[in-house]
Amino acid sequence: MTQCFSFTLADLAAQLDAELKGDGALVIEGLNTLQDASAGELAFLANPAYARYLDTTGASAVIMSASQAESWQGNALVLDNPYLGYARLSHLFDTDKTPAAGVHPSAVVSSDAVIHDSVAIGANVVIEAGVQLSEHVRIDAGAVIGHDTIIGKATRIGRNATVCHGVSIGERVIIHPGAIIGADGFGNAHAEGRWHKIAQIGGVIIGNDVEIGSCTCIDRGALGDTVIHDGARLDNLIQIAHNVVIGRNTAIAANVGISGSTRIGANCTIAGAAGLAGHLTICDGVHLGGMAMVTKSISQPGAYASGTGLMDAGEWRKNAVRFRKLDDMSRKIRQLEKKQGN
């Protein structure tokens, strides 16, 4: 069944402490983009590049900045940061249904788990011995919570996610479906022509207000812990190896791989498919471009990138041939420089 929403524009202005321009009694029943919105929907203008859609939008009202609102004749919610306003209002229109507190009959819950009365545990969930679940924790269907794990207030574990043993998760954390937290890191010793597994005896510590995307894997520490600090945002399909540390409010996009014992500072951004070698230190405020390959530590804040951008295939093939000749060309240049120096 489709969920119905109904808010007056004045109600939404009050939610955001925004300046209301236009008809406060206007009923808003949904959110949408400027391009796709229709009557009864609220859109937002965060990127000036999309201002061209204001003339044709079907939205009943728009969230916008004061400078944008000066020339806008329609209904508006005026804010310094329209995108943040959209983010805050989005929760009012969320179609996900919050389950009632209680334990589904098909769940398997250890008798010595400590579970607050307000916790909601879905179908086929497994809660092992020694687990502690605080107020308003939500464990969705099929998730597994390993023994001796502690989960803080208002944290949500998505469908079929696995939290292995001895993991500590803070408050208001969102772990999306299929994520795996606390599996063994990739630890092996090579001897006598074969690999010998190293027991991974550390844990994982996740701070408050962290979000972890679907199918992302965070390995437990080999010795000591893998740590994700408060406010970090991890996209889908990220690999975080043992003993990695992710700083506060750092955001990492999909398909990034971070090798063991690398430390990433606070307020960094790492774009999709970047790779970081192990035992590196990345300082605060570093921004890595897509597919960047990081092989050494970074001690100065700023934007970094590597690799080559998209080009015509024929041009790329020519450049690839030239790339193989770079070493020879470099030697010839040095020889010419020496001759000129003489």
Image (tube, helix red, strand yellow):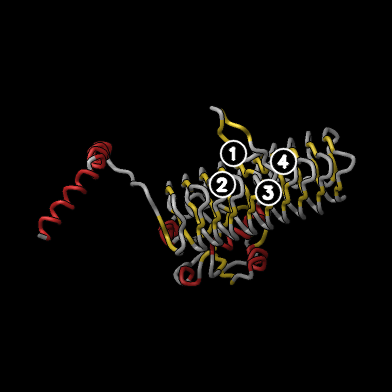
Read off the residue under disc 2: 260
Q: Earlier in the sequence, mark 1 or mark 3?
A: 1
Q: Single out the mark in the foreground, 2 or 3.
A: 2
Q: CA distance from mark 1 to mark 3?
A: 15 Å
Q: CA distance from mark 4 to mark 2?
A: 19 Å
Residue 223: x, y in percent? 66, 47
Q: Residue at x 86, y 39 (%)?
A: 110
Read off the residue under disc 1: 186
Residue 251: x, y in percent? 55, 55
The mark found on residue 204 in the picture is: 3
Q: Earlier in the sequence, mark 1 or mark 2?
A: 1
Considering the numbered disc 1 on the image, is that residue within a helix, a strand or a loop?
Answer: loop
Residue 160: x, y in percent? 69, 36
Residue 40 seen? no
Q: Along the line of sight, which residue is nearer the eye, 326 or 140?
A: 326
Considering the numbered disc 3 on the image, is that residue within a helix, a strand or a loop?
Answer: strand
Q: CA distance from mark 1 to mark 2?
A: 8 Å
Q: Residues within 10 Å of mark 3 (few under 14, many from 20)?
A: many
Read off the residue under disc 4: 164
Amino acid type of the residue that numbered disc 4 sits on in the rendered structure:
Cys
Quarter where residue 325 is shown: top left
Find out whether the residues at labels 3 and 4 contact each other: C-beta distance under 8 Å.
yes
